Image (tube, rainbow, N blue to C red):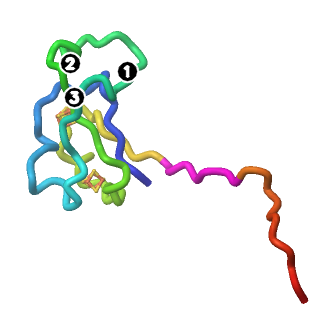
Amino acid sequence: MKAKIIHEKCTMCQACLDLEVCPKGAIDTVPLLKITCQTPCNRGTCFSGFAFDIDKNLCDGCGTCLKVCPQNAIILIEEKIPERRGGKSNATLRV
Ligand code: SF4
Ligand code: SF4
């Protein structure tokens, strides 16, 4: 599991950015160009030039950040395991 911020809900209160919240330091601000909201922003986020995001490579899914978000803007999602292409190995089995 990995934490994900629902940007349409985030009010940028910074509660999750507190250094004591995430033991992995996975929550940070990122340039807004990296964020793709699904609906038009009604929180003013688009005017700030940055947004809060979670580095999925650092997040271990502990869930601590979910408890501090007053907007319930952080959720845990299943990690997608990349499918292998082709499904067959080119290696030859020697017996
Ligand atoms: S789930 Fe845990 S590790 Fe992941 S961002 Fe939240 S506090 Fe950090
Ligand atoms: S605690 Fe929630 S509302 Fe506040 S900045 Fe973090 S994700 Fe956004």
Examine the structure image and report whether residue 57 is included in the region drawn in magenta: no
**Which is more toward the observer, 57 or 6?**
57
The amino acid marked with disc number 2 is Thr
Q: Which residue is mark 2?
A: 45
Q: Earlier in the sequence, mark 3 or mark 1?
A: 1
21 on left or right of 5: left
The amino acid marked with disc number 1 is Cys
* Residue 29 to residue 46: above or below: below
Q: Earlier in the sequence, mark 3 or mark 2?
A: 2
Q: Which residue is mark 1?
A: 37
What's the CA distance linking mark 3 and mark 2? 7 Å
Asked if the residue at tag 1 contacts the one at tag 3, i.e. Cβ–Cβ closer than 8 Å, the answer is: no
**Mark seen at residue 51:** 3
27 on left or right of 55: left
* Residue 3 to residue 13: above or below: below
Asked if the residue at tag 2 contacts the one at tag 3, i.e. Cβ–Cβ closer than 8 Å, the answer is: yes
Q: Quadrant of residue 15?
A: top left
Q: Report the span colored magenta.
A: 78-84
The residue at the point 27 percent across, 38 percent down is: 53
Whole-percent x, y for residue 54 in the image: 29, 43
What's the CA distance linking mark 3 and mark 1? 11 Å
